[in-house]
Amino acid sequence: MNDAAKAALDASARARASASASASAGPVVYWCDRDRRCANNDALGRAMELANERRVPLVVAMHVGTDLSGSGIGGARRAVFALKGLKELDEDLRARGVSTRTTTGSDVAGGIVETCETLNASAVVCDFSPLREGRAAREAVARVVEVPVIEVDAHNVVPAWVTSDKQEYAARTIRPKIHRNLGDFLTAPQALDDLIAAPDALTPSETDWDALIDTARVKGAHVPEVDWIKPGERAALAALLDPNVDSFLPQRLTLYGERNKPTSPRAVSRLSPYLNHGQLSPRRAAWEAAQLRGIVDDEAIDSYLEELIVRRELSDNYCLFNPYYDSLQGASQWAQDSLSLHARDVREYVYDYKTLERGNTHDELWNAAQKELYHLGRMHGFMRMYWAKKILEWTPSPEVALQTAIQLNDAYALDGLDPNGYVGCMWSIAGVHDQGWKERAVFGKVRYMNYAGCKRKFQIQDYVAAVDAEISGIGRK
């Protein structure tokens, strides 16, 4: 590992619990939760470095909780995608001489503590999460284990706590802070160091991943898998770089200027599920894109890096510093006041959850977007904005609108349960990271979008036909 990479690795970490260094010769435990990959993972790298410093083994702990059992809101769709990725990760880690341990059950923190106590761990390294459930679990583990606990942000290019110590108002306020630090973190990919104290031989994996996958399929049948994307770290890197599978880099990046047109699906990366599940490093994706200067137009590269880095990391910042990130309480006061003033405005159409869920409204464009989400687990980025704003227009109140949008996204999106999803709904419905606009019924001062505007931007019938064609063979249509 070169000096620049070492400096970035050190800056990506912070102490969650500052217990004295343990005299135990037990292993370092890396709790792998949000960044489920072997390569380009600073959390795994820090754990390996710590294990080598102490000359002890490294054990990677994984927990299969409610969300991965199939019984969570995302059903089999999210659970099986994650479990297949974890199975591959388990195989790759063990090939490197790294032992793994997997616990199951609703108590995430309890499972990790059990692993640490059973192994007499000498230190714990964990992934960073800005979401309340993830933060609560990390705090619970740090309170109980009597060894150092180190949290590493391998989910952002610039670690969230390096970028800012407060909630940023908008992209324009966080952008210079990210760019100021970008040179320190956007470094070439580095190979992991070998473990000094790696076991001479590993017993077969204790985890029956195939059984967990089968169980998730049964319990999660209410939201079945999708077949347009292959899970796992190797598939993620192929989707990024392998031209044999129509990778995003370099060829499709040249189309990025068309990304806001739903009728140009090849212009978007479709890497979001891999980033969401931690199977792809955003730093790796950003570095590879940056290497294409002189080959691909700078405008396309800059636009992609803006979305991949600035906009993604703005979402993590919002969720980290605003405890009401999925509630109208988290909106700016101007938006709360404006929405409250218009909460009782008459809606021309009002739909219940089931009607919205099945895409049975009067609006063919909205229906197509919802069907894409419901059947395929994805939605074009531009359509996500229109989709959420229409939910505000067609539900009884802003509170119901926000709850409905978040629930639909978390239930059906392969990249749901994520800061980007929460912030996307909050931007559309509650004006987060936006400004006040001309006041109108229902929306108040929140930015408005309508069918006519979409019609001017792209061929609506082409988008509707494309969605219908793609889902025509799915039994749940």
Image: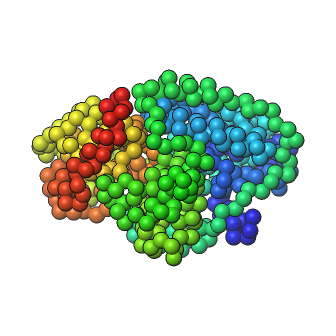
Q: In x, y percent, where is residue 275?
A: 52, 51
Q: In x, y percent, where is residue 405?
A: 32, 42
Residue 298 found in image quarter: bottom left
User: At x 58% / y 44%, what residue is drawn?
Assistant: 232
Horizontally, residue 338 falls left or right of residue 27, namely left
User: At x 24% / y 57%, what residue is drawn?
Assistant: 458
Q: Is residue 232 above or below residue 162?
A: above
Q: In x, y percent, where is residue 106?
A: 56, 29
Residue 159 found in image quarter: bottom right
- Give 252 or 167, whichever is nearer the viewer: 252
User: At x 40% / y 70%, what residue is drawn?
Assistant: 172
Looking at the rendered image, the quarter that the N terminus falls into is bottom right
User: At x 36% / y 60%, what residue is drawn?
Assistant: 259
Coloration mode: rainbow
Q: In x, y percent, where is residue 48?
A: 76, 52
- Give 3 or 372, whichever is nearer the viewer: 372
Q: Residue furthest right?
A: 200
Horizontally, residue 393 falls left or right of residue 1, namely left
Q: Is residue 91 above or below residue 323?
A: above
- Give 141 or 439, whichever is nearer the viewer: 439
> Is residue 450 shown to the viewer in this render?
no
> Is residue 359 shown to the viewer in this render?
yes
